[in-house]
Amino acid sequence: MKYIQIGNVRIEKTAALAPMASVADKAYRTMAKGFGAAYCVGEMASCKGLVYSDRKTAELLSVSEFERPMGVQLFGAEPEFMEKAVKIAERYSPDIIDINAGCPMPKIVCGGAGSALMKTPKIFGELVRAAVEATGIPVTVKIRAGWDENSKNAVEMAKIAEENGAAAVAVHGRTKEQLYAGNADWNIIKAVKQSVSVPVIGNGDVKSVEDCVRMYEYTGCDLVMIGRGSYGRPWLFGQIRDYFSGKTPRFEPDLDEKLNIMRRHIALLVEDKGERTGMKEARRQAAWYIKGIEGAAALRNRFGSLNTLADLDELISEISGNAN
Ligand SMILES: Cc1cc2nc3c(=O)[nH]c(=O)nc-3n(C[C@H](O)[C@H](O)[C@H](O)COP(=O)(O)O)c2cc1C
């Protein structure tokens, strides 16, 4: 097994779980980690929310021992708030503090944060510097390819991050204008890798062991990060880890195994958020787990009306009884 080093943090060179607000929560990360994700990043948290003591924002920073090495992610546009937010984040003892410079959501971009920073490289540099000077924890950044096709400045942004003390740069190879559509440009990830000496994390469109291997080979990146490709498939991290441990990647689970894994995931969700919220959020996660299985469309409706874990168990035994 190979490792990479981000500051003082050693990470297996397999695949990391990308930060995904309202998707990759603690339950999701725990599943990914349990199957072998090398590194996880929490859901983005607002610097201002933290500074103004918003409890819900602060909850996004919680790090369990099981999830380590784990990063927490901050978004903001003012260096003073970044500095204070980093000090608050430190209390949760994350292994890494990551700055979001990629989120395209209007409410984030309007405040000058997330991918808006791709248009304000100077402020971006100041944010990185403010964070780095506020803490001894390694600070990393997550950027996009650029704002739009005509302004792909990921290389410039990565250099600025490095000059200001960032310990690694993650690059999602899409522009802000692309949102999540079209293909990620792996050439830009390669160009960033060739321009900085800190580790580069490649991200965008990795959905299989083969994609992961291709991204390493094509871009030369130090670590591959997976977002949507892991929806309802935490075992993907196990398959990738098998491959890089010199083993044959484990098979895709059969229906009963998938249902078991989904049950574990939903139980964690309920444990973390309570049955009411947990089961509501479980509906979307469940739809991802059953994607592609026979009768998935009808099942999605049934999953859509689940309210309790007991309902879930009933549905699972029905599905698995019908299939056997
Ligand atoms: C639902 C969703 C939420 C996301 N939330 C965040 C976030 O909080 N912070 C961040 O840096 N990126 C966020 N992203 C972007 C992902 O981390 C990743 O860069 C993007 O999905 C591309 O990778 P993929 O093709 O493997 O999905 C989010 C993406 C999705 C789909």
Image (cartoon, rainbow, N blue to C red):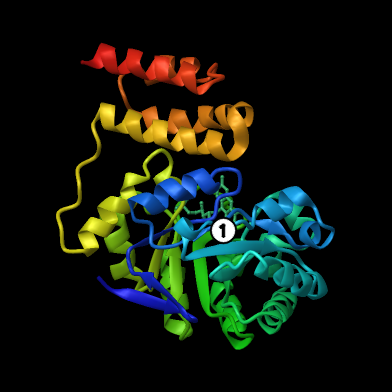
The picture places residue 58, in percent across and down from the top left corner, at 71, 55
Q: Quadrant of residue 222?
A: bottom left
Q: Give the quarter of the image for residue 297.
A: top left
Residue where numbered disc 1 is placed: 63
Q: Is residue 82 above or below residue 198?
A: above
Which residue shows up at 33% across the image and 74% down it?
3
Residue 263's x, y, as percent?
Answer: 40, 30
| Secondary structure state at the residue bearing disc 1 | loop
Structural crowding at the residue carrying mark 1, measured as other residues with C-alpha within 10 Å and reported as few (<14), some (14–19) or many (≥20) = many
The answer to whether 252 appears left or right of 22 in the picture is: left
Residue in view at x 33 percent, y 31 percent: 260
Closer to the camera in the image, 271 or 269:
271
Q: Quadrant of the C terminus?
A: top left
Whether residue 105 appears in this view of the structure is: yes
Residue name at image x 61 percent, y 33 percent: 274
Q: Quadrant of residue 63?
A: bottom right
Looking at this view, is 287 or 190 the one in front?
A: 287
